[in-house]
Amino acid sequence: MREKVIEQKLVAAVKKNGGICPKFTSPGFDGMPDRLVLMPGGRFAFVEVKAPGQKPRPLQAARHKLLHCLGFRVYILDDESKIGGILDEIRAT
């Protein structure tokens, strides 16, 4: 399955659960995650979407670590079957 298809399924699942999932772009600060997941109740996280089995590039991993150190949640999504679990975690925290 292609990354684009997984990303589309994420966006649809977030919308179905009452949230929005905008594409995140950060000019001048490369390596940031692909999507913001914004759920009802002010719950949110960053999601890096990858093709199955793919890992974040070194710069992406560094940005993810920075976000974690700042207290933000960052998920790596490379399989559509993980979408429900990710959304459950975001809603629960």
Image (cartoon, rainbow, N blue to C red):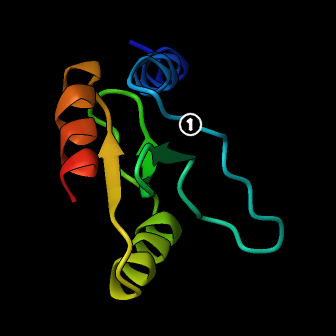
77 w.r.t. 30: above or below: above
Q: Quadrant of the N terminus?
A: top left
Amino acid at pointer 1: Cys
Q: Where does the image place residue 11, in percent across and percent down from the top left? A: 51, 25
What residue is at 67 percent from the left and 51 percent from the top? 24
Query: In this view of the protein, which residue sits in the foreground, 53 or 9?
Result: 9
Tell me if 21 is positioned left or right of 39 in this view.
right
Query: In this view of the protein, which residue sits in the foreground, 35 or 60?
Result: 35
Query: In this view of the protein, which residue sits in the foreground, 10 or 89?
Result: 89
What residue is at 35 percent from the left and 87 percent from the top? 69
Residue density around tag 1, few if under 14, some if 14–19, many if 20 or more, within 10 Å: many
Q: How many numbered marks does the figure carry?
A: 1
Q: Residue furthest right?
A: 27
72 w.r.t. 91: above or below: below
Q: Which of the 4 image quadrants contains residue 50?
A: top left
Q: Where does the image place residue 44, in percent across and percent down from the top left? A: 43, 55
Q: Secondary structure at mark 1?
A: loop
Tell me if 88 is positioned left or right of 76 in this view.
left
What residue is at 38 percent from the left and 72 percent from the top? 72
Q: Residue furthest bottom?
A: 69
Tell me if 70 is positioned left or right of 11 in this view.
left
What residue is at 41 percent from the left and 54 percent from the top? 56
41 w.r.t. 67: above or below: above
Mark 1, residue position: 21
Q: Where does the image place residue 79, in percent across and percent down from the top left? A: 26, 25
Tell me if 48 is positioned left or right of 69 in this view.
right
Q: Where does the image place residue 10, in percent across and percent down from the top left? A: 43, 25
Q: Quadrant of the C terminus?
A: bottom left
